[in-house]
Each structure stands twice: as structure tokens, then as C-alpha cells.
Image (cartoon, coloured by chain):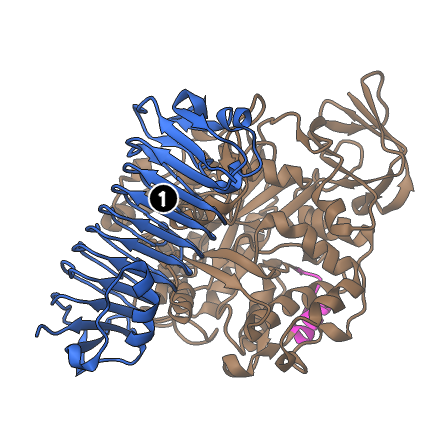
Amino acid sequence: MSKITLRLKEQPTVPLEAEILSPDTFAELSNDEIRSKIVYHGKRQCRLDDFFDVDGERSDELELHGDLHRVRWIGREMSRGRITVHGSVGMHLGAYMKGGEIEVHGNASDWIGAEMRRGLIRVHGNGGGQIGAGYRGSLKGMRNGTIIVDGSAGLEVGMRMRRGTIVIGGPAKDFTGLQMKGGTIVLLSGAEIRTGAWMMRGTIISMKPIPMLPTFTYACQYTPDFLKVYSRQLKPLGIDLPCDSGDGAYELYSGDASVPGKGEILVRQAG
Amino acid sequence: MLRITGGKIFDPANGIDGEVRELCVSDGKFAASVDGGRTIDAAGMIVFPGGVDVHTHVAGGAINFARAMTPEDHRRTQAFIRSQSRRSGLGGMAPTTFATGYLYAGMGWTTVNEAAVPVLSARHTHEELGDIPIVDKATCVLMANNEIVLDLLENGEYERAKNVVAWYIWAAKSYGVKAVNPGGVAAWKWGKDAKQLTSAIEGYSKLTPGDIVTQLAMICDDLGLPHPMHLHCNNLGAPGNISTTLDTLQHLEGHRAHIAHSQYHAYGGDDWDEMRSETVQLAEYFNTHPNITTDAGAVLFGDTVTITADGPWQHLLYKLTGRKWGNLDIENETGCGIVPYTYRPSNLVNAIQWAVGLELLLLIKNPWQVFLSTDHPNGGCFWRYPEIIQLLMCADFRNECLTKLPDKIKGRITLPELDREYTLYEIATAMSAGPARALGLHQKGNLGVGCDADIVIYEEDDDVARMFSHPRYVIKGGEIVIEDGDIRATPDGQEFIVKPSYDPGTDEFLQPLFEDCYTMAFENYPVEMERMENPDIRDCVPNS
């Protein structure tokens, strides 16, 4: 099966709501049908080919080119296939995703993989805030799946996430793991303040020292065995998670006692 | 002008049980005969008076706060897209104003009673009610924790209290009086609740919840309000509260009353683990006391949002669930709490609640005394009423649902022993004629000549839930509003209000008290008549 290539030809002046940019939508459609799909330019309904050149048809592999920082909802609720983006993307990338893969060679905005259930999202540039988070009012964020952002991340990474893994390569901003209910967040370059606030369960692993909230209690220094499993899982994705006991121990903090929660934060010790 | 021919008529108000008759409508009312106009051939169809909801929460500060608190529901729920005949809106747990009208009418309900309005937010409530199309509306104003009223009752000034209540009803442009957890919400301002009918309320030296119940019921009767006191008993939702409920009913001392959502007041046991249904006792009381009516406040499994003036209960519910909690300050009048909630069949307490609502509907023998309600949105959303009708009409379906409940429920509920099935005539009574009579709206729920031509016509269907959720026609005030699943017209409904007489000196009495403790000006407090859209002032018949 060949792939479908879309090139942005006209920069939207306001956000373009394009949840149809998904393998589930395009897999059975001819080129003409794909071109005629509806996108919302602000409140106006437009055809997809008002903004994109479209090559190819009937494929669950999509390749997007151009500066898509105003294009929202790419891969929303997708359950299969693959989207590759050469350029930056707008908010809600892979929100509610149920399967398949998204790879972005560029930056992504807020709400990457919000409330996703399965699948893999990989952003090589920087990410925005609320990665894998639950939308406002929801009880749960991402239920499962993996999100990897090579660069930095914004506020509230993994807010109310229930399961799954988030890896942030660069520094993350405040409130990482806010109200987290499960799952794992790996911070390769640490985070700013209030990490793990209102955390109920789940694990935050930081490779760099981070400021701890006073409602987290220091427990011990050790290298958990489960890190070996995580390390093995992340290795094929190019993530190096040190797990040998000789490779330096982790400090374990538990909290957040203000909820009260049973979460854990592991901070790798230098040396 | 309109003629409906060939339909099987179910009109409990006139004792008509499934006879094929002709209905004539002229000028929005039923007429003996009619010349010209459209004829609807209803052969093979079932004709009911339009539904009447005696207890619901569809407008005002609390439901609006619930809307604001549940954006997660707005994302997943039914959206009403704007069209020629329809405004945009959202359905779901707390539907928006216009959608509320479309959903009620779409299901064949044409009159609703907003059961809890503080005077302070009455203006807001009427603004929202004005935006609920098609259905007619009435409201009940909250009185049982109003500190000015309570002070008067404490001091034994019954006559003045009666005048003040009448003044409040007119100030709120309301139709009746609501009592919520009498004294309990006032006590909560001291960090307490009021669970014993005969103990003095916190902050008062001798006034008890029982005194409030007795005297407010008497005030409603003395003022001659068309609808008796609408009472939410103390100790809602707590295991073992049956004793409180029965005690409350005895405190009515023979006065009329409507007991709201009895399901929440019919539990035995000492704690959550021991909780059981006590509907047999409660139903027996109703079966022997025709002066009181009730609505079920039935629970349906699924997501909803609970809203009530019972602030202390909502705080407890928030502590139990750990979910979102909203609390509104309503100054000296009442409280208000909002907590989203999910009723699960696997949860023993929820399963018992589900059974208790149905048991009350089945055990209270007279359908003129017990009405269909979910205490929307507390026990479930009003647009799920057809599911309850199905549970009432089909014992087999009920038994099938029972198999999904936890084993531990055995011996705690009576439902498995009940094989009663509602007839269509009884459903018409419990969803329309009965609540209309309890509300004192004799022109509603009645297909007799001279009454309001609110009609719902169903196509007979073995699937009861489907039949009742998709009427073929709904006619409001003689106008066809729903036809073949489409909204054809969205006329404005009326608002029923009453103007009980009170001593003209009541203003001078209230003003200094008011200016002493309220945050708004006295002049801005009462709702002006000009604010009301389509008001209809109903008569009060005071005891002489």
C-alpha cells in the first residue's frame, strides 16, 4: 500500500480544525474523496484541498509536510496506521488515540495524546503543555500508550494520567504529573517546580535533581528492579534509562501527602 | 383547530382507560366538537395527556453551576445544532435551557416543576425558565432554612411567619413552597446537621425540624396554595433514615404534603455495609394516608450530577467519592451543593437505591399518590424516564436487570418478590394526571373539555422504552410541536405563579431585617412582574 502525502499550500490564518487527518478516515477513500473532506477554518467549513495538496489514496500511512502549527487534532481518535509529519504541528496531536503511530519531525503544541488509550506518539522537537493529560473536567488522562518528546515540555505533563508512559527529553515546566493516577513519567532533564502535586499513584522518574514539594517524604535510596523492565521497553525507542545498581542509585520520595496519595518520585543521584 | 381520531385514549382524570374516542381541540383547549382544521388519524396509536414532572431541577443557580462544573459531559453528549426552528444546545447530565425544552417535549412531557428556588436566585431562575421552550413551568421557593422565617417560628409568631412566607412566594414569583432538610441547612452554617425531628436546631434554643415541618405545612394549607408543601425530608441518603422519614410524616399532623424523591428516604440499617430497603414500611404509610403524595426519585445506573439545596449532604457525598464538589453560598436562605456522581450496579449501595425507587413505585398502590421522577438530575437524567416506564411495565425485564446486581443484595431488597406490572392507564396516572393533580394544575394531565390541549401520541410498540422515548406526535396547547421525531414548533410555555394574600405591613417588617444582613438592596430583591415571560397567576383558596 502506498502512502498519502499532504503538503500545506496555504497557511491558515486562524486554527484549522482537521480531525479528519487520520488513517481511519483516509484508508478507504479515493484521492478525490480525500480532497473533498471537510476541515474547519475557524467557524468556516472548507475543503481539505483548500489548504493541502494531496497525493495518493487508500492508505493508512499519511505523510504531512509544511508548517502545521495552526493545524489541530491531527490523528484524533486514530486506531491504526501511521502519520509522519515533517514540520511542526498544532494542538491536540493524537488526542483520544486508540492505536497506530505518530512521528513528528518538528515541534508539537499542547495536549499531545490527551486522553489517549493506546499507540505511540513521538515528537522530535519540543512539546507543549498537558501532554497525555485529561481534558478539563475529565477524571482521567491517558489510559495507556506511549508518548516520547525529545525536547522540552510545558505545564501539567501527564495531568490525571491513569496508565501508560511519557518520556520527556528536555526540561519540563511546572506541575508535571499533576493529580496523576497511575502510569510513568520519565524526565531525562528534570522539571521545574511542583512536580507530582496531588499525585495519587504512579511513578515519576527524573534523571536530574528536581525541587520537591514539602508534602513528599523521603523514603530511601535504591535502584528498583522494575526499572530493568522499563529500560528494556524503552531501549528500542532510543531511550537510555540507567537501571544497573552500579550505575548509581535513585532517591525515592512518596506522596503527595496532601491528597493523600501513594505516588512515587525517583530522582537519580549524580555520580 | 385539530381533531384526533381513532386513538386509544388513556385519560385517568376522567376514568377513560383505553377507549377509542375522538379528541377535538380549539383555541389550545379541548372542545366538545370542532369544525375544520387538521385531522390526525391516530388509529392504532395510544393517546396520553402530556407528561407532568412534579419534581425536577432545570433552571437557576444550582443547575447552572452543575453545567459549568461538568465540561467533560459536554464533550461527549448529544449536541443540538442550530436550525430554522431550533436553537443550539447540549443534552447530557445537565442540559442547557433550550435543549431542556426540546428534550422534555421530545419525550412527551409538557409541564415541569422546578422544585428548588431560593428567593435570591429567583430572578436568574425565571430568566432561564423563559428560555426553556414548549413546556409550561412552575417553581417552588425554598423556605425551611430561611433564617427570617425560622426566627419567627422560634418566637412563636405563626401569623407573621405566614405573612412573610406569602410575601416571599410573591417576591420569588413562585408557585409553591419547598422545604429542604428543614433546619439542617441552617445548622450546617454552624458545622452541624439536623437529623432528629425533635431536637433543637443548632443556633436556635427551641425550634426543631419537626416544628418547621408542621408549621410550614400548615402555612401552605392556610394560604390555600394549589400545591401543598413540597418536602425534602431530613437525613437524606443515610442508612437507617426510614425512622426520620416516618417521624417527619407524623409531624404533618394531617396536613397535605408532597414528599419529594422518597427513594432517598427509605433506607434501613445502621451503616453503609448494613444498608437495606425499608420501602414496605414507607409504602404502607402512603397507602394509609391519602393526604400525602410523593415522587419516586428513582435511580438509574450511569453518570449524573447531583445538585441539591442540602449542603451538608453534598459535603458528605464529596467526602465519600472524592470527586468534584461545588458549594454555593445563598446567604440567609438555604445552601447548595453540587457533586458529579456515577451510580454503578456493582456498588451495593447504588444497587439498593435502584431497587428502592422501583419498589416505592410498585408498593404504593394508588398511582395518584406516587409519581415518576428521578429527581433530575440527582437519580438520573429526566430524558431517561422511558427506561423507568419499561422497568415498571415489564416484570421480566426487571428480573433480568436484577441478575446483574451483586449477590450481597439478597435479603436487603423487596423488588424480587414484586410481580406487579403497571398498565398504560397507571403509567398515564403516574406521569401526568397524578402529578398534575398534586400540583393543583387541574387544567393539566386531563383530556376533558376545557382543559389545556397537551397531548402525546405514541405508536404502539412492544419495546416500551422505545415507544415512550419516541412519541409520534406531541401537541402543546393545541399546537403540534413534535411530529415523526422532528421538532415542528417551539412555542413559549407559560409560568404558573400564585399571589397569596399577606398583610401589607410585611414590607416594613422585612426591610430592616433584610438590610441588616443581606448583600443586596431590598428594592432589588423581589422579581418584578415585568421580568416574567407569559405568567399565569393561579388562584389560592385560603382556609377561612
Q: Which chain is brown?
A: B
Q: Is residue B450 above or below residue A149?
A: above
Dominant SS type (magenta):
helix
Q: Is residue A199 visible?
A: yes
Q: Residue furthest top?
A: B36
Relative to B41, A245 lies left or right? left
Tell me the quarter of the picture where residue A220 sits: bottom left
Q: Quadrant of the N terminus of chain B?
A: top right
Residue drawn at point x = 35 percent, y = 60 percent: A161
Chain letter of the residue carrying label 1: A
The residue lying toward the viewer, choosing from A5 and B32, is A5
Q: Residue furthest left?
A: A271
> Does the magenta segment cover residue B292?
yes
**Rendered location of residue B213, percent (x, y):** 51, 64
Residue at the spot of label 1: A93
Badge 1: how crowded within 10 Å, few (<14), some, or many (20+)?
many
**Rendered location of residue B246, percent (x, y):** 59, 73
Q: Which chain is blue?
A: A
Q: Is residue B191 visible?
A: no
Q: Is residue B254 above or below residue A107?
A: below
Relative to B453, A202 lies left or right? left
**Rendered location of residue B448, percent (x, y):** 80, 36
**Rendered location of residue B41, percent (x, y):** 86, 28
> Does the magenta segment cover residue B524?
no
Tell me the quarter of the picture where residue A247 sits: bottom left
The residue lying toward the viewer, choosing from A194 and B281, is A194
Q: Which residues are magenta?
A: B279-293
The residue lying toward the viewer, choosing from B300 and A197, is A197
Three-letter code, disc 1: Leu
Q: Secondary structure at mark 1?
A: loop
Relative to A12, A175 lies left or right? left
